[in-house]
Image: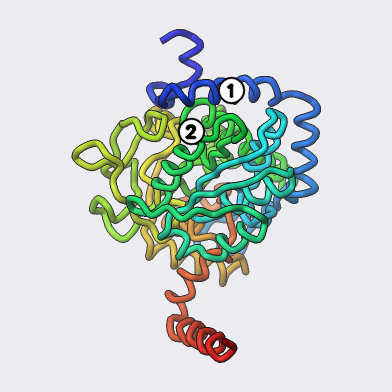
Amino acid sequence: MNRATQAFYYGPYGGRFVPEMFGPALRELDAAWRKYRKDPVFRKDLNNLLHNYAGRPTPLLKADRFAELIGCNNVFLKLEGLAHTGAHKINNALGQALLAKMMGKTRIVAETGAGQHGVASAAAAARLGLHCTVFMGEVDMRRQYPNVYNMRRMGAEVIAVQEGSRTLKDAVSAALKYWAGNLQDTHYLLGSALGPHPYPRIVRELQSVIGREVRRQLGVYGFSAPQLLLACVGGGSNALGLFSPFLPDPDVRCVGVEAGGSGPEQGRNAIRFGGNGRTGIAQGFKSVFLQDQYGNLAATHSVSAGLDYAGVSPELAWLKERGRVQFCSADDRSALAAYDTLSRSEGIIPALESSHAVAAALAMAGTLHPDTVMVINISGRGDKDIFITAPHFEEKAWKDYLLSEAAREGRNE
């Protein structure tokens, strides 16, 4: 492996495993990112968008009532759900959309699972005057309809993916196929820190604003650094966004929380580490994937659409192998309970993705020193999950509401 190719990798993971038709577009993107990432005009425009459009910096809240529940005095919540569009995804979407515009592209294509990346991409495209097409699995469209509605209102074309499991992995494949036919004028706005080089580096760097803000904000509370960081892990963008500025500090423990789903059997969860995951190559990169006996991406399950994915960031795979980042999992039941607990204790309704990180914190109750400084990345807010959470917590009231709405619409016809 020569020096240039080595830059594509994190240890043995990463790379660029794509048909040659994608080569020129990826090389163009790599060159543009290296040119603009420190360009004063690009940085000024991006910082302006992050501050005046996305609403950064997002707050770092000292969660005293939640802290009492786990016996830890210094629990902080990084409230990415208060960023415009309701999640951390806007950080990356704005950066890539601005880069696409500087490259002369007029269209973006994106994939989405929970819909937050799709909403962020649609918003960034609308703000910057780009056409936006979003691919979303048919299953995810049903369980995340509010986000589908919001994407369409902002002018995005949302295309239902009906192949395979009709979830995130199939949306990624469909987006790549679309991009292959529209390389000249279209940028693929990939939503997580995975895919072929240079996407993992671009997304990680754009999301690292989260961790950089945390370091500054902790200083206001009198702490120079955290001791424990918690973040959910689907592809890995919100986790790396929080972790990456602290990775050089060995005293900061980083814990990623995967989706334990409905059980340990293959197909019922999305646990890549400590589960059935093994090294493979898929969708343009080498990492740890859940695979069937033939090496195809296996079916996954999570109550949270954004964690329902068979692969994971190649950088996180390498950090796990090195022992720098630890991983655990939270199942559907624990995530729903954590969603309820944080809502009641702090008045913050987290996304079901983020609820997995909250569940991990609750599982640590009684095991941590009382003075541990913990930061949990609340990567999104839970508005989008109402079609999942309402039937769980208020089944009868929810059904009655839907039936009454259906009856009212019928009377109006």
Residue 197 versus residue 168 in the image, above or below: above
Q: Residues within 10 Å of mark 1 (few under 14, many from 20)?
A: some
Q: Which image quadrant is residue 47 in? A: top right
With 123 as the anchor, is 148 left or right in this view? Answer: left
Q: Viewer-proximal residue, 290 or 152?
A: 152
Q: Position of residue 379 (x, y in %)?
A: 57, 52
Q: Position of residue 230 (x, y in %)?
A: 51, 47
Circle 2: element type: helix
CA separation in Å, label 1 and label 2: 17 Å
Q: Which image quadrant is residue 100 in? A: top right
Q: Position of residue 196 (x, y in %)?
A: 47, 29
Residue 210 shows in the view: no
Residue 261 versus residue 236 in the image, above or below: below
Residue 21 versus residue 303 in the image, above or below: above
Mark 2 lies on residue: 180
Mark 1 lies on residue: 30
What amino acid is found at the position of numbered circle 2 in the picture? Ala
Q: Residues within 10 Å of mark 2 (few under 14, many from 20)?
A: some
Q: Name the residue located 57 percent from the left edge and 49 percent from the top edge.
A: 117
Q: Which quadrant of the rendered structure holds the C terminus?
A: bottom right
Number of marks present in the image shown: 2
Q: Which quadrant of the rendered structure holds the N terminus?
A: top left
Q: Nearer the viewer, mark 1 or mark 2?
A: 2
- The tag earlier along the polypeptide, 1 or 2, is 1
What amino acid is found at the position of numbered circle 1 in the picture? Asp
Q: Viewer-proximal residue, 326 or 368?
A: 326
Q: Name the residue located 44 percent from the left edge and 44 percent from the top edge.
A: 174
Circle 1: element type: helix
With 409 as the anchor, is 316 left or right in this view? Answer: left
Q: Name the residue located 41 percent from the left edge and 57 percent from the top edge.
A: 363
